[in-house]
Image: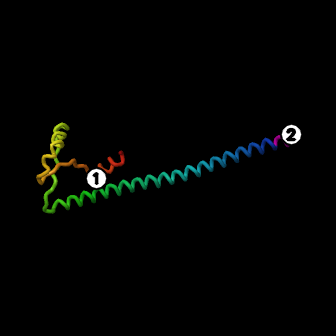
Amino acid sequence: MIELDEQRLEIRKTGKNVTEHVTQNINRMIEDTFLVWEEKHEKLEERVKNQENRIYFLEKQTWKRNMKEIRPRPMIVTFSTLGIKIKILKRKGELKDSQYYLKEDYSNYVLEKRKELQ
C-alpha cells in the first residue's frame, strides 16, 4: 500500500512538472512569435516613415523646379496679429473685378489632416 501511495504521489509530481514545462514551452513559443511580429511591425513603421520622407522630399523638389517657370507666382503673407488677417479676409470681396485674389494657404498635408479630423 505504501508503495502505491508513493507511486501516486510521484506520478502527480511528474504530471505537475510536465504540465509546468509544457506551459513554459508554449509561453516561450508565443513570446518568440510576438517578438518576431513586433520586429516586423517596427521595420514596416520605419519603412513607411522613410517613404513619407521621400515623398515629401520629391514633392519639395518638384515645387522648386516649378519655380523656374516664368509665370506669376503666389505671394505668401504673414500678419503679426490674427485681427489684421481677419480684417483683410473680410474685405477680400472688394478684389472681385481685379486680377488679384486672397485665400488661406495650407499645404496638402495640413488639408488632408483637417479632413481626417472632421
Q: Residue at x 22, y 58 (%)?
A: 63
* Picture quadrant where residue 13 is located: top right
* Type of amino acid under label 2: Ile
Observer-nearest residue: 101 or 111?
A: 101
- Magenta-highlighted residues: 1-6
User: Residue 27 at x, y = what percent?
Assistant: 60, 48
* Type of amino acid under label 1: Asn
Q: Residue at x 13, y 58 (%)?
A: 72
- According to the picture, the residue beneath numbered tag 2 turns out to be 2
Mark seen at residue 35: none
- Specify the farthest residue to the left: 98
User: Residue 45 at x, y = what percent?
Assistant: 41, 53
The residue tagged with tag 1: helix, strand or loop? Answer: helix
Chief secondary structure of the magenta span? helix
Q: Residue at x 62, y 50 (%)?
A: 26
Mark seen at residue 108: 1
Q: Magenta span has 5?
A: yes
Q: The C terminus appears in which quarter of the rendering?
A: top left
CB-based contact (under 8 Å), mark 2 and mark 1: no
* Picture quadrant where residue 87 is located: top left
- Per the model, the C-alpha gap separating discs 2 and 1 is 84 Å
When the figure is inspected, residue 12 is found, relative to residue 58, above or below; the finding is above
User: Residue 7 at x, y = what percent?
Assistant: 81, 44
| Relative side of 13 to 93, left or right | right
User: Residue 1 at x, y = what percent?
Assistant: 88, 40
Q: Residue at x 15, y 62 (%)?
A: 69
Observer-nearest residue: 9 or 27?
A: 27
Sooner in the amino-acid sequence: mark 2 or mark 1: 2
Q: Magenta span has 117?
A: no
Q: Residues within 10 Å of mark 1 (few under 14, many from 20)?
A: few
